[in-house]
């Protein structure tokens, strides 16, 4: 039995019972799963929980390691168990049940969370104490942002050289960044970036998080600059165009 609450009114999950408040949704829950944009949104929900002591709170949001540590402390003070569980993959992986999940927290709590997470992932990996999973997710998204910016530079170089756009994408898809190019090629060829699988604003948030945590990440700054020229709600393929 699943009860949901969404910050955006009107968004309903088929087969689930919708609640109007966080407290209503979480009262009496065995497990609370958070799927939110960022740390501030996660904090609002964690502070509004009405769950019983011992309830497992699983947060799949991509947030900073320090933010996650603060949330874990808040949950622990309330007698709750907290597991961070950021996911690798976007909308296609969600629909196909192929998300990869990184978990961190107390080992026993992470084991308990794995059963729930298996519902949408065939790959749940325990990474260690709170902060490690979030750190690894930010590293992955930093690489994604840098790669997207690199593809964008290559595409623009090809355009400046007067090369056939399809040939440029053929060569890039055959190279080291082929997986990313292949995943976004249809969008690039149609110049269609609406209905994002992963929005530019979400990536930019993650790049800012890792840049604030680690000094002198020059390529992350380059990726941020490339993303800043794209609409917030566009798919990250826009960075590659």
Image: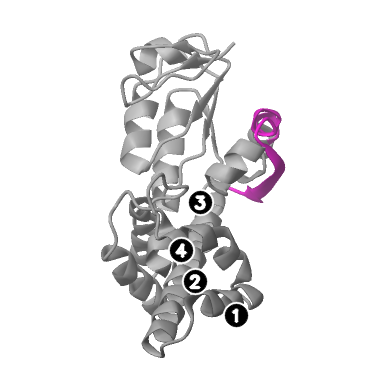
Classify 228 as above or below 72.
below
Q: Mark on residue 31?
A: none
On the image, the x and y values in percent for residue 99 come to 63, 44
Secondary structure of residue under mark 2: helix
The earlier-in-sequence mark between 1 and 4 is 1
First-in-chain label (4 vs 3): 3
Asked if disc 2 and disc 3 are in contact, CB closer than 8 Å, the reply is no
Tag nearer the camera, 4 or 2: 4
- Give the Cα distance between marks 4 and 3: 30 Å
> Mark 2: few, some, or many residues within 10 Å (few <14, many ≥20)?
many
Q: Which of the marked residues, 2 or 3, is nearer the chain's N terminus?
A: 3
Residue at x 41% of width, y 90% of height: 161
- Left or right of 180? Residue 117 is right
Q: Is residue 188 above or below residue 81?
A: below
Between 164 and 169, the residue placed more toward the observer is 164
**SS under mark 4:** helix
Q: Secondary structure at mark 1?
A: helix
Instruction: State the residue at coordinates (61%, 44%).
Output: 93
Spatial CA distance of label 1 from label 4 is 14 Å
Residue 104 visible, this orientation: no
Q: How many residues crowd mark 4 within 10 Å: few (<14), some (14–19), many (20+)?
A: many
Mark 3, residue position: 134
For the residues marked 4 and 2, what is the alpha-carbon distance in whole angstroms?
15 Å
Comparing 110 with 73, the one in front is: 110
- Place of residue 54 in the rendered image (x, y in percent of width and height, measured from the top left): 56, 20
The mark closer to the camera, 4 or 3, is 4
Crowding at dot 1, Cα within 10 Å, few <14 / some 14-19 / many 20+, comes out as: few
Query: Which residue is denoted by mark 1 in the rendering?
Result: 171
* First in residue order: circle 4 vs circle 2: 2
Q: Which mark is residue 147?
A: 2
């Amino acid at each position: 039995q699943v009860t949901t609450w969404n910050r955006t009114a009107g968004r309903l999950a088929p087969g689930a019972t919708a609640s109007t408040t966080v407290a209503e949704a979480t009262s009496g829950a065995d497990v609370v799963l958070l799927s939110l944009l960022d740390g501030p949104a996660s904090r609002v929900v964690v502070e509004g929980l009405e769950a019983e002591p011992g309830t497992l709170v699983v947060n799949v949001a991509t947030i900073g390691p320090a933010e996650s540590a603060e949330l874990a402390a808040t949950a622990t003070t309330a007698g709750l168990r907290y597991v961070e569980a950021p996911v690798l993959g976007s909308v296609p992986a969600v629909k196909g049940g192929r998300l990869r999940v990184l978990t961190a927290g107390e080992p026993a709590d992470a084991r308990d969370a794995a059963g729930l997470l298996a519902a949408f992932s065939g790959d749940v990996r325990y990474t260690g104490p709170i902060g490690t999973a979030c750190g690894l997710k930010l590293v992955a998204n930093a690489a994604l942002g840098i790669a997207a910016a690199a593809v964008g530079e290559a595409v623009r170089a090809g355009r400046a050289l007067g090369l056939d756009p399809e040939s440029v994408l053929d060569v890039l898809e055959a190279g080291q960044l082929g997986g990313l190019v292949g995943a976004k090629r249809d969008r690039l060829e149609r110049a269609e970036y609406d209905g994002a699988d992963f929005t530019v604003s979400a990536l930019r948030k993650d790049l800012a998080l890792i840049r604030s945590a680690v000094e002198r990440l020059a390529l992350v700054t380059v990726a941020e600059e490339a993303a800043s020229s794209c609409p917030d709600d566009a798919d990250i393929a826009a960075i590659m165009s």
